[in-house]
Amino acid sequence: MKLYKKILLGAAFVSLTASCTDGFEEMNVNPNQPGTATSAQLLATAQYNFATNIGDAWNNGRMGMYYSQYWASTYYADESRYQIREGSNNTMWNDFYANVLRELVEAQKIEMEKQVVGYENRVAIAEIMKVLTFHYLSDIYGGPIPYTEAINDEIATPVYDKGPEVYKGLLSTLEAQIAILDASKPGFSSGDVIYGGNVAKWKKFANSLRLRIALRMIDVNQADAVTAIQKSLDPANGGLISSNADNAMFTWLSGAPNNNPLNQAYKTRVDFAVSEPLVEYLKKYNDPRLAVYADPLNNKGTAILDAAGNKQYVGEVYGLDGSSGTSNGDSKVVSLPSDYLIGATAPTTILDYAEVEFMLAEIAARNLSVGLEGTAAEHYANGIKASFDFAGLSNADYVAYLANVPYVATNLETALDAIGSQKWIAMYGQGIQAWFERLRLDFEDPYTDEEIFALPADGSLDPEVTTVPFRMSYPVIEGSLNSENYKDAVAVFGTNSKGAKAWWDVK
């Protein structure tokens, strides 16, 4: 197997987590001789690589967290002004294919060969992880990606399936895997960091992921989106994520190399501060999550108080040129991210209860005939409550805040402004997904009609992007390695620009 180096990574992670995470087993690998990986080890490695790829300082910090304007750069501002590093882009693409999808395929092969009791569940769980990975890839790059011919050793130059075709395949695959999952049979007894082998929770996750995919495409294919939503809402299919206990998260350990990758990045550099747009919007409606998401101004850990004795929170101006007065990460000048997101063991969230409730609020606001119980206002409030609960805030805090931001719905546009703005706040940390929702919902302040997001203060460095990138450009090396198929994919957009919209982004 050509996975030896990756097996070692998975072995290290599983071994380190064995003492504190239920279901993990210790591994002994002879460093002088390739070992034989188990499906559990391959799954753990795939989940680790996936969580790293969507949660690290490059793809999350310098792409997702910038494009969703949760964070701003403290001195090296090129990415926040939309000039990317091509090497990082290529690494992101390769990691999804080679270090996540490949390992999931190999895990499935092992399960299919051995066919130990419950293997159908384990193959299905790996398949759902593959859907999740392809979903990220397709949305990041705007639609067309190698999909049906990907991860095939017989095909060196896979075709790029168009965005609608990828989505059709993802929804079909999820439907099949949800039907296969059987909670009366075992899942993974080890290696599943996300759900510890809990088959029922994987079923809830798959239904919730189907809901996300359906809503992402609803403005361009409402008929198929509604069908998918109906299936996810059908209790016979296993239900949705219905509490924070069901959240799909990758939990990190306290020590390197298995601590949160953002935590590791902050040990040597302070490249990010909480952005001014986020800080000011949270202040505007007296949102207590500000004190959870951000650290106050401080001098070596001692809070700097204002004249009234209150802690101060100041966001970094978004998109400043490094020469024009950025903070350089000085905690006396700007608020830095708190341990809520960059703590050593802070989890990487993949899909959570708050997001599900905001999706349900949107479904209700659109008046879709899908058998949903509850009003848009009720699900909107549930989404805020779920966020407050996860942040460790009190019910009194929630009640007071909800009075400041009541659900408004004079029309669908204002309803989506209300839902989108609160969904954005609740998804803090999930930079990539929040970026997509910013694009799809194109929301503003529902009470004032003011813009929430700012243009880069010192302008965009990409002449084809003014407000925010709509997609990531394909890695340049694809033009050499998979030339003809790459050209076909670029032709869909007419350009390989970050300024070309994803197929589902019609606002």
Image (spheres, grey):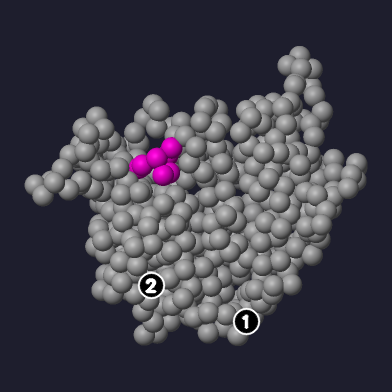
Q: Nearer the viewer, residue 417 or 245?
A: 245
| Residue 193 drawn at (x, y percent) | 65, 42
Residue 61 placement, left or right of 252: left
> Which amino acid type corresponds to the residue marked 1 in the rendered image?
Val
* Relative height, residue 36 to residue 472 (above, below): above
Pointer 2 residue: 418
| Residue 147 drawn at (x, y percent) | 71, 54
Q: Is residue 188 visible?
A: yes
The single residue placed furthest to the left in the displayed view is 307
Point out the image quarter for the N terminus.
top right
Point out the image quarter for the C terminus.
bottom left
Residue ID at (73%, 35%): 41
Q: CA distance from mark 2 to mark 1?
A: 22 Å
For residue 199, what is the image quadrant?
bottom right
* Relative height, residue 236 to residue 186 (above, below): below
Q: Which residues are magenta?
A: 337-343
Instruction: Look at the image and say whether residue 61 sits in the magenta stretch.
Output: no
Q: Nearer the viewer, residue 74 or 356?
A: 356
Q: Earlier in the sequence, mark 2 or mark 1?
A: 1
Within-10-Å neighbours for mark 1: few <14, some 14–19, many 20+: some
* Relative height, residue 279 to residue 284 (above, below): above
Within-10-Å neighbours for mark 2: few <14, some 14–19, many 20+: many
Residue ID at (58%, 64%): 242
> Which structural element holds mark 2?
helix
Pointer 1 residue: 370
Residue 178 placement, left or right of 495: right
Residue ID at (38%, 66%): 421
> Which amino acid type corresponds to the residue marked 2 in the rendered image?
Ala
Instruction: Look at the image and say whether residue 339 sits in the magenta stretch.
Output: yes
